[in-house]
């Protein structure tokens, strides 16, 4: 069942989430401390500049008794200080923004690395529950939202609150009448902001929900584009995506609507406040209680009070997005893998496989394997056959510990697979799955999978063994001295789409064999190849599988005749076990499968 985890708490400040973020920010604390100090230095310089205005302006309009030279002498020092302050403000603001952004990106790098590493350790059951598109959203857009928490959210929001408080005190100290008028309308702005907060939270929740749906369907549609085009369903898929994006559009428009109302309301409240200040200030100038320079200084300080309030909506949006995204990220990081590796057993594996009374279900409701017991001795080849859904691939998945069993024991060399070091266990198993996957890169990359113990020579040996050396050599430049050697560096498109199904199968087979595994699992290894290629594979693997434990899962019964034993599974139960000839002579399920297949 795919989980949908788009609900958010709606809280701007969540102390629990902030405590989770702090360990990521702690290594970069010097950057954030320096950026915060610079913010207050900038504020101090900005306030200092406003105190230069009264002297300069009053020096010029101080009265007719002053000469021009006297007025210029009065304003010369303040004007010089003002010029120096402007230059300092520009330089410090540049460094403050740069340092804050640098620190934020460092934190995001650490979070993204931790999140991706966590996803890499999750078992198959985790990906059965989570849509890939939503996981991509977590690692991309959600992580980017958290970066805003550091670059333009939390630090600047705290700074803005302190700035408003500091400016309010300065305004009242300068002139208590004007100050009380300026600060007196703050409750009105607070009411507007509270109204906006409630509406914006709901609309933003809708945006995040629809974004997750959009990304999930987009990933699915692109991954399945070949199926879509084969069945001519481009228009149908496009219409479904259109409906999803219409929901996303509507959610964004609702958010825009509230922002469109919020900002005019804030501007109207500020205009009312400014009008009141001008009215009281005009009377003060007329009465001689307030000088023109002091009134202009007051208006500049008033802008310091307004600007944080004006940006309140934007800051709220940033903080809401960051907190919601951080909540999702940590919810994902909190998912503990049910499959935990242990270092208890990490010895070389011989390949003795035993399954004892295995019971397993993917969803805890529908049983897949029922009281299944099997033994594969070192060097033996066991073939698993049966109808689709009989549990053949599940047996292989439990052996490689992609899933943990419900009850019973899966043991390798007499040790429960849960007691083996997971890396040691899996690197000792050469697995060729049904849904083989090739990465964008080179032929060599896809064979070695960046395993340090696999050299170019080993890769070439594996290619020769499975008969893939011929087509890999054709990928090399015509003038290459060693075509196979040069072919290792041939590019591979994403998912290997430029190769035939048989060629991809051969490369996957070479990948499994290159690591010299003690156990080889072939899950429908020849299902997508023609008869000629199948013969080449059979010829190549005979020598390589000699001395190795192997489990061969196949519907094409021609590929399992030479197995040491054949196990017939039916509805998760072991119904028959024996050699090809023994099972044919028995005339049971296996004999019927052979008859149906070869008659067909």
Image (spheres, rainbow, N blue to C red):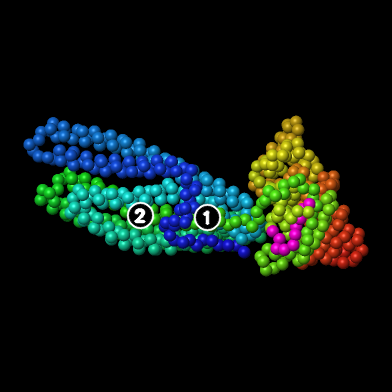
Q: Which residues are magenta?
A: 404-413
| Helix, strand or loop at mark 2 | helix
What residue is pinned by disc 1?
A: 330
Q: Is residue 114 visible from the viewing direction of this image? A: yes
* Residue that lies at the very extreme toward the left in this rendered image: 65
Residue at image position (18%, 35%) is 75
Residue 288 lies left or right of residue 231; in this view the side is left
Residue at image position (20%, 48%) is 174
Residue 33 lies left or right of residue 304; in this view the side is right
> Could you say where residue 273 lies in the image, as x and y percent from the top left?
23, 56
Q: Say how many tags the image has.
A: 2
Q: Looking at the image, is mark 1 or mark 2 earlier in the sequence? A: 2
- Principal secondary structure, stretch drawn in magenta: strand
> Could you say where residue 68 lies in the image, as x and y percent from the top left?
12, 33
Between 505 and 326, the one lying in front of the other is: 326
Q: Quadrant of the C terminus?
A: bottom right
**Whole-Å distance between the Cαs marked 1 and 2?**
26 Å
For residue 370: magenta? no
> Could you say where residue 138 lies in the image, as x and y percent from the top left?
53, 54
Residue at image position (14%, 34%) is 71
What residue is pinned by disc 2?
A: 312
Q: Residues within 10 Å of mark 1 (few under 14, many from 20)?
A: some
């Amino acid at each position: 069942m795919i989980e949908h985890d788009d609900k958010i708490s709606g809280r701007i400040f969540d102390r629990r989430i902030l405590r989770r973020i702090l360990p990521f920010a702690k290594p970069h604390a010097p950057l954030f401390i320096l950026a915060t100090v610079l913010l207050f230095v900038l504020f101090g310089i900005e306030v200092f500049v406003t105190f230069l205005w009264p002297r300069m302006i009053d020096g010029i309009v101080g009265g007719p008794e002053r000469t021009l030279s006297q007025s210029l002498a009065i304003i010369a020092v303040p004007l010089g200080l003002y010029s120096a302050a402007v230059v300092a403000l520009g330089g410090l603001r540049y460094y403050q923004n740069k340092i804050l952004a640098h620190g934020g990106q460092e934190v995001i790098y650490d979070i993204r690395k931790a999140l991706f590493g966590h996803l890499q350790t999750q078992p198959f059951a985790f990906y059965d529950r989570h849509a890939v598109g939503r996981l991509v959203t977590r690692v991309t857009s959600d992580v980017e939202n958290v970066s805003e928490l550091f670059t333009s959210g939390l630090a600047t929001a705290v700074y803005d609150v302190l700035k408003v408080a500091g400016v309010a005190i300065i305004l009242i100290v300068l002139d208590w009448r004007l100050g009380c008028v300026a600060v007196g309308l703050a409750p009105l702005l607070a009411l507007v902001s509270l109204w906006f907060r409630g509406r914006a939270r709901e609309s933003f929740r809708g945006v995040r929900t629809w974004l997750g749906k959009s990304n999930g369907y987009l990933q699915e549609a692109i991954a399945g584009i070949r199926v879509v085009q084969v069945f001519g369903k481009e228009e149908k898929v496009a219409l479904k995506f259109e409906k999803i994006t219409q929901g996303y559009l509507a959610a964004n428009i609702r958010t825009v609507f509230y922002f469109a109302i919020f900002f005019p309301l804030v501007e109207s409240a500020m205009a009312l406040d400014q009008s009141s200040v001008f009215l009281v200030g005009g009377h003060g100038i007329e009465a001689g209680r307030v000088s023109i320079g002091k009134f202009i200084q007051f208006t500049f300080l008033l802008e310091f009070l307004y600007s944080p309030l004006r940006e309140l909506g934007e800051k709220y949006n940033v903080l809401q997005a960051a907190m919601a995204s951080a909540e999702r990220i940590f919810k994902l990081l909190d998912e503990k893998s049910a499959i935990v590796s242990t270092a208890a057993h990490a010895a070389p594996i011989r390949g003795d496989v035993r399954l004892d009374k295995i019971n397993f279900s993917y969803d805890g409701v529908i049983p897949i394997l029922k009281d299944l017991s099997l033994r594969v001795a070192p060097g033996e080849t066991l073939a698993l056959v049966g109808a689709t859904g009989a549990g053949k691939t599940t047996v292989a998945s439990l052996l490689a510990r992609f899933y943990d069993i419900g009850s019973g024991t899966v043991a390798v060399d007499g040790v429960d697979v849960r007691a083996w070091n997971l890396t040691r266990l899996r690197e000792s198993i050469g697995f060729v799955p049904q849904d083989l996957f090739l990465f964008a890169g080179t032929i060599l990359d896809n064979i070695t999978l960046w395993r340090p113990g696999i050299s170019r020579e080993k890769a070439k040996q594996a290619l020769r063994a499975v008969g893939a050396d011929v087509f890999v050599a054709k990928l090399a430049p015509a003038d290459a001295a060693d075509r196979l050697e040069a072919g290792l560096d041939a590019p591979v498109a994403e998912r290997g789409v430029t190769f035939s199904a048989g060629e991809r199968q051969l490369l996957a087979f070479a990948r499994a064999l290159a690591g010299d595994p003690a156990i080889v699992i072939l899950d429908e290894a020849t299902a997508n190849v023609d008869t000629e290629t199948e013969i080449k594979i059979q010829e190549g693997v005979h020598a390589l599988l000699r001395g190795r434990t192997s489990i061969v899962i196949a519907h094409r019964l021609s590929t399992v005749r030479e197995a040491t034993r054949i196990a017939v599974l039916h509805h998760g139960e072991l119904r028959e076990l024996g050699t090809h000839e023994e099972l044919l002579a028995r005339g049971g399920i296996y004999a019927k499968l052979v008859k149906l297949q070869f008659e067909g």
